[in-house]
């Protein structure tokens, strides 16, 4: 296929079927080993890599066709990545935030995050996510967030895949909640309260319902009741989840064993009076719960405490900045629960708070699984970076 024909609209193609380049040299992305490893050269022990480099491009349809919405798989691969992180097998610099102002509140005008990770062990994946968040997009009929993920060969650094990361970002966040809930929620969870009915709320509900398929009620509240009602109806029809839209936060969180906030708020929506003994509280964003919610908890768990502190906008981070929370007050990071080096829930009456900020390893791990499935199913389109490098 001549790429000029694509640009000029002379030839149509589907992203869910691999399109290969003519005269593409011997470079071929193997399904069995997605890295660009060519046959050995004449010198024993020396691996020769192709000089022509191409990468796999996956649009959102191709990402979905690669089983992105399989929540058990998402939990498995993200959980494995956090276990490796706890074992020192993951490298991840802190998230970089680009915004138009100096405060978290300025993010209402839009911001970009860049997240990176190199995962070792049996995974051997590296890459980054570039994600923009513009709340005003809803008024334009566009999603608030859009993301691209780049995966690279850990041996050469060459790109192996570029894909839509918008839904990957949502799914990995739902998987992170589900993993925490698995270790920290009461065994007899009958009611779950969710504050917020945005895109992320879908994958939060999917993750929660995956862990508790027999939950009696998932109460959902949103500033716009119509939005909560529409999402509740969608979740009932799509997954059979018992989601019910309610009008107030009090009603959503009353008597809930799991209480979760998933909003863009920078002022508390969840208060200590909402949380009964033995409940698990979950937050994923900013200062959505008052300090007293955390102060009454016996355990505080994070995805990574250093990440939460560095971002500096979540309630535990704000408490730490004010001297109200010490490093020693953090019970565990998620990976330690998965490995069993720290206990999860130990009693029925302990309140527990789980805060996860999101890490690049979540995105890279899930994107890598999507990429492998896409290779096996011949999804996407291969694009050239170069056929012959100009300078070596």
Image (cartoon, rainbow, N blue to C red):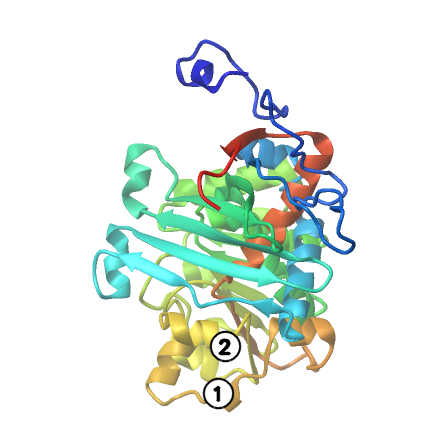
| Quarter of the view holding residue 140 | top left
Which residue is located at x 71 percent, y 50 percent?
Answer: 47
Q: Nearer the viewer, residue 139 or 255?
A: 139
Q: Which numbered disc, 1 or 2, marks the residue that appears first in the sequence?
A: 2
Please give left or right for residue 116 compared with residue 51 in the image.
Answer: left
CA–CA distance between discs 1 and 2?
Answer: 8 Å
Q: Is mark 1 in CB contact (under 8 Å) with mark 2?
A: yes
Could you tell me which secondary element the residue under label 1 belongs to?
A: helix
Q: Would you place residue 255 above or below residue 216 in this image? A: below
| Badge 2 density bin: few <14, some 14–19, many ≥20, Cα 10 Å | many
Please give left or right for residue 131 compared with residue 349 in the image.
Answer: left
Q: Would you place residue 256 above or below residue 159 in this image? A: below
Res 314 label: none
Please give left or right for residue 190 compared with residue 139 in the image.
Answer: right
| Badge 1 density bin: few <14, some 14–19, many ≥20, Cα 10 Å | few
Q: Nearer the viewer, residue 347 or 9?
A: 9
**Residue 189 position in % (x across, y down):** 67, 64
Residue, disc 2: 305
Which residue is located at x 38 percent, y 66 percent?
Answer: 286
Q: Would you place residue 375 above or below residue 14 in this image? A: below
Residue, disc 1: 327
**Residue 334 position in % (x across, y down):** 61, 71
Q: Nearer the viewer, residue 389 or 284?
A: 389
Residue 215 in sight in this render: no
Residue 320 in sight in this render: yes
| Quarter of the view holding residue 27 | top right
């Amino acid at each position: 296929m001549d790429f000029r024909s694509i640009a000029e609209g002379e030839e149509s193609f589907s992203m869910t079927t691999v399109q290969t380049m003519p005269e593409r040299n011997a470079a071929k992305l193997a399904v069995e080993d997605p890295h660009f490893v060519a046959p050995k050269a004449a010198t024993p022990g020396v691996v020769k890599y192709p000089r022509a480099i191409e990468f796999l491009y996956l649009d959102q349809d191709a990402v979905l066709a690669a089983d992105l919405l399989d929540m058990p798989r998402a939990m498995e691969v993200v959980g494995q990545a956090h276990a490796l992180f706890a074992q020192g097998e993951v490298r991840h610099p802190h998230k970089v935030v680009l915004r138009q102002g100096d405060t978290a509140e300025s993010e209402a005008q839009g911001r970009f995050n860049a997240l990176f990770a190199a995962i070792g062990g049996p995974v051997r994946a590296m890459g980054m996510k570039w994600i923009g968040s513009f709340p005003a997009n809803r008024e334009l009929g566009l999603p608030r967030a859009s993301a691209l993920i780049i995966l690279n060969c850990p041996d050469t650094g060459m790109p192996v895949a570029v894909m839509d990361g918008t839904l990957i970002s949502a799914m990995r966040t739902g998987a992170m909640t589900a993993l925490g809930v698995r270790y920290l929620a009461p065994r007899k969870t009958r009611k779950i309260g969710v504050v917020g009915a945005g895109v992320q709320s879908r994958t939060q509900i999917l993750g929660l319902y995956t862990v508790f398929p027999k939950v009696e009620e998932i109460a959902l509240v949103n500033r716009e009741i119509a939005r909560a009602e529409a999402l509740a109806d969608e979740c009932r029809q799509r997954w059979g989840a018992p989601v019910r839209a309610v009008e107030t936060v009090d009603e959503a969180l009353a008597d809930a064993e799991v209480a979760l906030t998933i909003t863009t708020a920078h002022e508390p929506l969840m208060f200590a009076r909402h949380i009964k003994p033995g409940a698990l509280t979950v937050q994923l964003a900013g200062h959505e719960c008052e300090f007293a919610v955390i102060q009454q908890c016996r355990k505080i768990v994070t995805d990574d405490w250093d990440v939460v502190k560095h971002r500096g906008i979540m309630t535990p981070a704000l408490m730490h900045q004010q001297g109200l929370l010490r490093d020693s007050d953090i019970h565990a990071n998620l990976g330690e629960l998965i490995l069993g080096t720290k206990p999860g829930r130990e009693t029925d009456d302990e309140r527990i708070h789980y805060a996860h900020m999101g890490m690049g390893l979540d995105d890279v791990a899930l994107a890598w699984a999507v990429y492998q499935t896409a290779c096996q199913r011949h999804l996407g389109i291969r694009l050239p970076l170069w056929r012959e490098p100009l300078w070596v």
